[in-house]
Image (cartoon, rainbow, N blue to C red):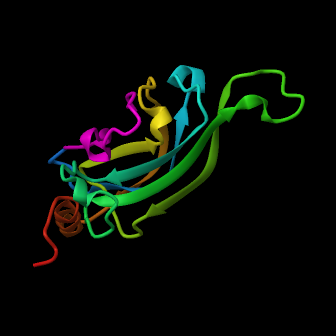
Amino acid sequence: MPKKQFGALLYRDPHTILEYSNVLDINKAWKVKDYRCWISGTCNDMGINKESAAAVDVQLSTDNIPNSADWNNAGENRAIGWGTLSYWFTQSNIKVGTPQAGFARMLMNSEYFMHPDHLIQNKLTISAQALGNSDLEGTDGYIMNYIVYLEEYDITPIESIVFNIKGKAQDLSL
């Protein structure tokens, strides 16, 4: 994904993974089998030189979601996957005998959740937001890597209509 600043809002910059718009082939769809995300680069690359922590939220969606209240909301039908990661940035010489000095990026925890009943026909986006303590303000930002495993499906025209509607914004509370 493009470089983002710590604290940049999750919904502001969705990154398109898949965009398929062949109106003559409505029988093709994909399902996300699994995905993973991680911050790449060293602390030096990110400009981190103080002990700090960051919490990262990640979301997979079938459409752009412009309203921040709809992010990380399992009731939002366009959202199909959610992830949360926590990082600790600290001195790398915390272990006796470590020859290098400087700061290291450590992944402390990661969890991923997928909506079990989803098929993608048109678009798949990923967004990320990393929030941290004040020591991360003014750093050079971070780059989020991701890997997404898709499985292709053949569907009927009726299923195509249902999943197209489901993949777009709908107010399901009415």
Q: Position of residue 145 (x, y in %)?
A: 49, 36
Q: Nearer the viewer, residue 80 or 142?
A: 142
Q: Nearer the viewer, residue 153 or 56?
A: 56
Q: Residue furthest front?
A: 134
Identify the residue shown where x is 39% and y is 44%. Answer: 129
134 horizontally vs 53: left or right:
left
Q: From the viewer's perspective, is residue 49 above or below residue 33?
A: above
Q: From the viewer's perspective, is residue 132 above or below residue 170?
A: above
Q: Position of residue 105 (x, y in %)?
A: 63, 35
Q: Which quadrant of the rendered structure holds the N terminus?
A: top left
Identify the residue shown where x is 55% and y is 49%. Answer: 86
Is residue 31 visible to the viewer in this orientation of the structure? Answer: yes
- Please count the marks in the image: 0
Q: Is residue 5 magenta?
A: yes
Is residue 32 visible to the viewer in this orientation of the structure? Answer: no
Identify the residue shown where x is 41% and y is 26%. Answer: 138
The part of the image, by quadrant, that contains residue 53 is top right
Secondary structure, magenta segment, majority class: loop
Q: Position of residue 137 (x, y in %)?
A: 42, 31
Q: Residue furthest left?
A: 174
Q: Position of residue 100 (x, y in %)?
A: 78, 21
Q: From the viewer's perspective, is residue 96 above or below residue 124?
A: above
70 horizontally vs 89: left or right:
left
Q: Is residue 55 magenta?
A: no
Q: Nearer the viewer, residue 55 or 125?
A: 55
Q: Nearer the viewer, residue 102 or 21?
A: 102
Q: Which range of residues does the magenta coloring cover? A: 1-21
67 horizontally vs 18: left or right:
left
Q: Residue furthest right?
A: 97
Identify the residue shown where x is 54% and y is 58%. Answer: 111
Q: Which quadrant of the rendered structure holds the C terminus?
A: bottom left
